[in-house]
Image (tube, helix red, strand yellow):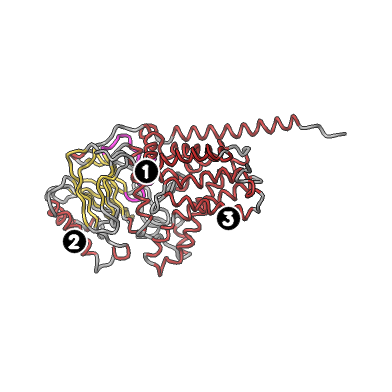
Amino acid sequence: MRHPGARIAQGPLWAQAVLAVLAGASGALAHAPFDNAIAILIPLIAAFGLLSIARSTAAAGLLGVALGTGYFGATLTWILEPFQVDAATTGWMAPFALVLLSVGLGLFWGAALAFARWAGARAWVLALALTGTEMLRAYVLTGFPWATPPQALVGGLAGQVLAWGGPHGTMLLLMGAAALAWTMSRQWAKAALIVALAMLLDVIPLPMSDSPLTDKTVRLVQPNAPQHEKWDPARIPVFIDRQIEYTADGAVPDLVVWPETALPYLLEHAQPAFDVIADAARGAPVVLGIQRSEAGRYFNSLVVLDATGQVAQTYDKHHLVPFGEYMPLPGLFRSLGIQSLADRVDGGYTAGPGPLLLDMGPLGSALPLICYEAVFAHGVGATSERPDFLMQLTNDAWFGMRSGPQQHLAQAQMRAIEQGLPLIRSANTGISAVIDPKGRITAALALNEAGYVDAQLPAPGAPTLYSQTGDLPWVLFVLLGLIGAVLHRARTRRAQAIDAPAPEA
């Protein structure tokens, strides 16, 4: 039987690139709002197919860029949403942002295919190279690991691999499954069996057995303030009153959590509001997001209010969103008339000093995460002491009403699984949720719904292997494997040179 890539291999490069874009785009079906996890194998298997037909290193790189551009372009369509909040000012940037981001991320995949082709077009090299470029994507230029393929697995049994391998160990396993499926593609029965087994692991839901719970109740407050109304002076009192009303309602919880930038005031002017909030909380501590200034610098922060409304602890967000919360080279972009979406001063927010643990009294210690900080697995595991739970405050109104908030929630589930810790998240427009150490959602408020939810805080699980090792073992494994690929290529070329017939005199 003719190999499925044989006919494609004979076609022009532009046609191969178009097919690569389509194969990459199909991977978006694995993520929210579709959540067909098995679809994540399509672009990964396609990567091996493209490697097999690439006629040169440059062609492999181009096909890899096309594959990645299709994947990221279709998955990250929510990136258009922040630019529509003030469409008159920033709307024109939206298509450029999506194209540039998709192609930029696609370059990582292109580099992986180009290296694998250069190193001899071996499947194991591509598996290591694509895993390696996904690692780089988590770190380079502050990192952007959104839509990493393992993100598709959080809803099923396969997602539990994150507890021992983290995102990169899980990525390597996905690449192994895709390589095996491609290798067996001539033998359709075996290939079908491999895909069926992968599908089984992908779609089998994690059993919803009762999570061990503490006796502490947390209240997550969700005011549902659309981004275009959030800073409207006429609407601000409505959203503040909602949060105060939800805080004062019903039985007194052990902790109340409001979302990111829940108050429109700077911290230094917010004490009158804090006094009202403390009265509504009736003795319960309140965690809320707020901005603060210091010596002309602005911070995206959260504070812990004690029973009297005084600020007991403060945390400043340290992993800021480039072009969203700060502008690289602000002078240059200001001259071009471009500013960050959340600009407060020249250049945007200032980064805080780094992760820290908050003492939440009887609830234990919490690692605070503001919005985008929950995207970074290595950042969540960066503290020297292990917290009792993770606490995310976010304003997902920036991300629109469909895929963005849902994908952000999936990443919060990843962090819970990786660390073996519960995670509580209060989101301005949703999805607010309590997540157990297995990544299961035990309580939630729907997207674009105003209200609050009370839930018992899940107990922390045992430390996971990934929480103890982090990325280092996988970085070393991939690095040594790629060095081995380079050495193997050098030996092969030397052997070829030796075996080549000498030129005739």
Q: Nearer the viewer, residue 287 or 201?
A: 201
Which residue corresponds to mark 1?
A: 154
Lateral position of residue 161 relative to residue 433, left or right: right
The quadrant the N terminus occupies is top right
Where does residue 195 sit, x and y in percent of width and height?
48, 41
Where does residue 128 sit, x and y in percent of width and height?
52, 37
Residue 207 seen from this side:
yes
Secondary element at tag 2: helix
Which residue corresponds to mark 2?
A: 241
Q: Earlier in the sequence, mark 2 or mark 1?
A: 1
Lateral position of residue 262 relative to residue 338, left or right: left
Where does residue 312 sit, x and y in percent of width and height?
20, 46
Secondary element at tag 1: loop
> Which of label 2 and label 3 is nearer to you?
3
Q: Is residue 143 in the magenta section?
A: no
The quadrant the C terminus occupies is top right
Within 10 angstroms of label 1, few (less than 14), some, or many (20 or more) residues? many
Residue 292 seen from this side:
no
Q: Earlier in the sequence, mark 3 or mark 1?
A: 3
Which residue corresponds to mark 3?
A: 18
- x 28%, y 45%: residue: 441
Look at the picture and state if 89 lies above or below 39.
below
- Location of residue 156 by image quarter: top left
